[in-house]
Amino acid sequence: MSTDTLDKGQARCPGAPSTQDIIAADKVTAPGWVRSESYQFLGDADIPKNRYIDPAFAKLEFETLWKKTWQFACREEHIPNVGDYHVYDLGPYSFIITRVTDTEIRAYYNACLHRGTKLRASGTEGSTDEFRCSFHGWSWNLDGSHKETVCHWDFPHVKSKDFALPQARVETLGGFVFINMDAKAPSLAEYLGPEALAHIKAWKLENRYVYLHVAKRLPCNWKLAIEAFQEAYHVIETHPQVAPSNGDANSQYDVYGEHVDRFISTLGVVSPHLYGKISEQDILNQFTLGDSSALGDTKLTVKDGGSARAVMAEMFRGMFEKATNTDLSKVSDSELLDCFSYTVFPNTFLFPGISLPMVYRFRPDPRDHRKCLYEVLFLRPVPVDGSRPMPAEAIRLEDHQSFKEAAGMDPGFGGILDQDTDNLVLQQEGLEASAKNGLTLGNYQEIRIRHFEQTVDKYVGRKA
Amino acid sequence: MSSSYARVVKSTEIPSGGRKVVEVEGKAIVICHVNNNFYAIANRCSHAERPLERGRLGQGWIACPFHGARFELATGKAMNLPATEPVVTYPLRIVEDWIEVLVEAAPPSGG
């Protein structure tokens, strides 16, 4: 059937099985959150380009969007004990995320209430029983109550009850600590919506730990960086080395409410762009892993009549169990192999799969709307013996460095991130140079970008 | 000026993630155990000269509990404000389960 006769957004890659067809043929059945679809056509007008290139738009985002949304600030494992703290910075804002009791985490605005000095330097963590300003020594208890004004006799107008540290809201989910500056914002559960919340809860990411953490500044607006990772449409042109083992053009795209969207991109199957050119053994040979260190030197072989995907699922289960000392016997082939990419608006990506067990976070540079900070965290299951390794310290790459240079980064995956980065500088400059005022999007494969930008519009339209 | 390694504590007495303050040649030193490595760092923050001993141990650093300055355990280098100056670190070795630290003795006074 010609795709021209379909309603907008209903066309899919011709001649290729759907993501759900591929997953349905797997040996170990996938859970419900994998075997569902939630696509919605959201229009086909161009996205105005000024949001990526206008510093005034970035300023508006800081005044509206960033003050009203739930943001991943740190993992609970970054502050395991009472008194531990972790400083989370977002643009001009800074928060001390601290564990006040075994069950309560708070986020204090990171500024002394005397003359404004940051109580803790940006990007740091530590442990304390009081937050004491390094300038004049004013101090606050762990619970945020005012502890001491040095030379109190000179400040009769300072009443301790009025000088508690201001707080942002805090909620935890899956081992992540989320904060929100807006006292009137919906709860995190309402923000995510019931379906996305159920997905995230099902992954039990609280049972993982940060195995590797890499940070690098990217040469583009933060939204361009995010959107480069929201579709598999670019794989065949940008990452041709991946296409032999990635169902790119037949990936699945879903949207959930205003704040969550996802794709499922199957691995261990050939790209529809390469049908007839690639054997099942080629798929295995060229498969690129995000965390291949867990595999060691094992080589995989497809027997006659078998499929690369089936072989990989079987082998992965055993190898990842051994490498990570975990029980994966009930985990589906799809969860072991496929790339599940979820965006939690505005700046977090969750990848609950086993082969690409990642989290991305993007933050705008407050001094330059053409720069952003990108972080990738690899989460491995906590060993079955229950011991929780200390979370990895962030490796901070210089602008000129390759992702491959980060110790522990899979070189194949590091190369993929380098390819993405190279595109982004060209895209930022190209948008500024273009005679065209907007970005044109595919109805299906680029639906996450439209979904994301529509939510941006909603927030910047709502003045703080 | 003379120097020799001084036995300070049995390595088995400091669990992973733990620390112990010892004194050698009149100097207070924190012995830290992080990720199967032991480090010896002076028990005095270079920023406000407060003791570091109750500071959090991270992957290769200790954070001053008073104002949050962090120092590399291996080199003593200051990692963030409000500190900019390093903290003294000492060579450390393990002999027969004993942690030994090398501290240069102070020169004799007077004369």
Image (spheres, coloured by chain):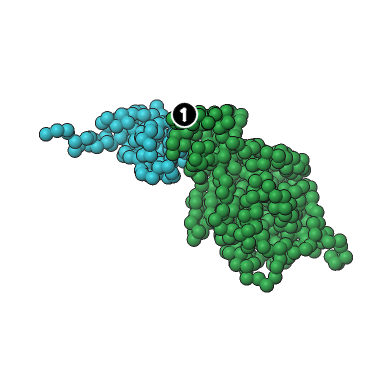
Disc 1 marks a residue whose amino acid type is His
Q: Nearer the viewer, residue A276 or B37?
A: B37
> In the image, A156: left or right of B53?
right
User: Label 1: how many residues lie within 10 Å, few (<14), some (14-19) or many (20+)?
Assistant: few
Q: Is residue A385 visible?
A: no
Quadrant in the rendering for residue A57: bottom right
Q: Which chain carries label 1?
A: A
**Quadrant for the N terminus of chain A in the image:** bottom right
Quadrant in the rendering for residue B74: top left
> In the image, A315: left or right of A194?
left
Residue A174 coordinates in the image, percent (x, y): 65, 38
Q: Is residue A123 visible?
A: yes
Q: Which of A76 and A273 is in front in this view?
A: A76
Q: Which chain is green?
A: A
Quadrant in the rendering for residue A451: bottom right
The residue drawn where x is 73% and y is 42% is A191
Q: Mark 1 points at which residue?
A: A152
